[in-house]
Image (tube, rainbow, N blue to C red):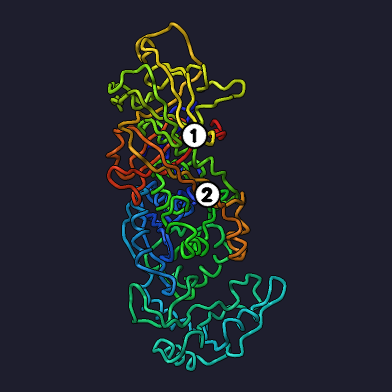
Amino acid sequence: MFYTDYTEERLISVEKPITPPNFIKNVIEEDLRTGKVKEVVTRFPPEPNGYLHIGHAKAIWINFSLGDEFGGRTNLRFDDTNPAKEDTEYVNSIQEDVKWLGYEWEEKHFASNYFEEMYKRAILLIQKGKAYVDDQSADQIRETRGTLTEPGQNSPYRDRSVEDNLKLFEEMRAGKYQNGEKVLRAKIDMASGNINLRDPVIYRISHTPHHNTGDTWCIYPMYSYAHPLEDAIEGVTHSLCSLEFEDQRPLYDWVVAECEMEKVPHQYEFGRLNLAQTVTSKRKLKLLVDEKHVDGWDDPRMPTISGLRRRGYTPEAIRSFVYETGISKAYGVIDLQVLEHFVREDLKLKALRTMAVIDPLKVVITNYPEGQVEMLEAENNTENPELGTRQIPFSREIYIEREDFMENPPSKYFRLFPGNEVRLKHAYFIKCNDVIKDADGNVTEIHCTYDVETKSGSGFTGRKVKGTIHWVEATQAVPAEFRLYEPLINAEDTEEIEEDASEKTFLDQLNPNSLEIAHGYVEPNMKEAQSQDKFQFFRHGYFSVDPKLSKPGQPVFNRVVSLKSSFQLPKQ
């Protein structure tokens, strides 16, 4: 398989292993060598309670890439055990995101397809004296669970007979009890140093219709009970998950063993992907959507895969990014500039380089013939000649960026000011002669003259100018909207606000300047730009046509990334 390599700022395709050296690969190689496993089976198991985010992109890559690297299989499985928070909208979006990233699953499964089997295994636990029905409330269970230094307290219902527990559990399934009235708990060890083993709840009552099973069930397994059973049922050999599940591995192994599963999967944990100024908690992302702080799950400011796609990120850039971040157990926060670096590297040979004026100021070239429109040739990408050239119009009236003119400039300002001459990209030298202002003293128009001998490509060498500016011909310019983004979160390290901060504290961290909307013009050939078409606008950055807001003849462009960054990939 070929991946992107970056050396000395040149994009080169070189053959690499599908994943870099890592501890999970070492485990798999040893398992195959010793015959512990005959075939590698992995899975990507999202809960359909929200949209996938950039952290999931790493988990997807790890599972699918390791499965592929060892000639195995990778399944897509929806861990849909909590109907109150799940929806088919999320199921559909997850499948779309996985495919967009470039992966195809071997089989698609739902945890809910195994509910009957999970119920039978719970019955087995009760019969073995390994599970019991508890009448305590959720608050009571939490209060008697103990602390890291103090053991928990046994439930007064812990010693119910097997017969009573079987009867009560069957009544729970039959719908006799209300939500929260009873739960089924595993009977393990209330004094365990691992709090996850202190008689965890494995079934709870929820009279909520399920997106897949409808009203068939009113009791649902907890994730920590269901997940290991799903892996065992599907024959998963290497259950790969992020590091926060490490403390639950003993419970994972307990469930598989005590439920007497024929196939025994093993769990391995890796460090999850953490980006600076980025929150990936689904609960907090959903809060942003529900309270309309963003324009839905696919808002280009969101760290969701659909948000990144709408903004203009490419799957190739994301795959290269997660490859370079590697697989380890270390916790770390990665600067956003690292991700943006890979986006630039992927787009720089793909995107057409064109001109857009975001804050327009009109220029009248007074000595250019009135009514004349001249077509000039411009290359589409100087680093990729295969993208060819285009024709752009030039006439007496053009638009330039307002920041490219100053009436009283500081020293070393080489753009346009009275008496100064600059080069128009792909066109001529122009010289500012006059400034037109409104009644309030604001500059509304500048008058210039051009030198016909200085046409771009003519070989003119009579004199040099220090400034080159971009422009758009005024009579055929296409009005466009430009959406400029900054990070949605102000905090650099978001670990604390990921899970612990209150909703108010989290919302206080939102960047009020995360979106700026500007209106300007683009070249006329951009009029028919299609959804997700990508361009490099001179000096402004890489932009992509918004798939939801753009209309025929009225394009809306999302800035994907700016042109430059201070980040440099370390040399290998």
- Is the N terminus in the top left, top right, bottom left or bottom right quadrant? top left
- Residue 395: numbered disc: none
In this view, which residue lies farthest toward the front?
Answer: 439
- Compared to residue 88, the image places residue 20 above or below, namely above
Q: Mark 2 Cα within 10 Å, few/some/many (few <14, many 20+)?
A: some
- Amino acid of disc 2: Ser
Task: Tell me what residue is drawn at x 44 percent, y 92 percent.
Answer: 167
Q: Helix or strand or loop: what does disc 2 sit on?
A: loop
In depth, the one of 195 and 386 nearer the eye is 386
Residue 376's quadrant in the figure?
top left
User: Can residue 456 be seen in this snapshot?
Assistant: yes
Please state the horizontal and vertical placement of residue 206, each as a whole percent of the image: 44, 81
Q: Looking at the rendering, which quadrant does residue 365 occupy?
A: top left
Total number of numbered labels? 2
Which residue in the protein does label 2 denote? 514
Q: Amino acid at mark 1?
A: Asp
Foreground label between 2 and 1? 1
Number of residues whose C-alpha sits closer than 10 Å to that of mark 1, classed few (under 14), some (14–19) or many (20 or more): few
Dot 1 lies on which element?
A: loop
Question: In this orientation, does residue 569 appear?
Answer: no
Q: Is residue 363 left or right of residue 141?
A: left
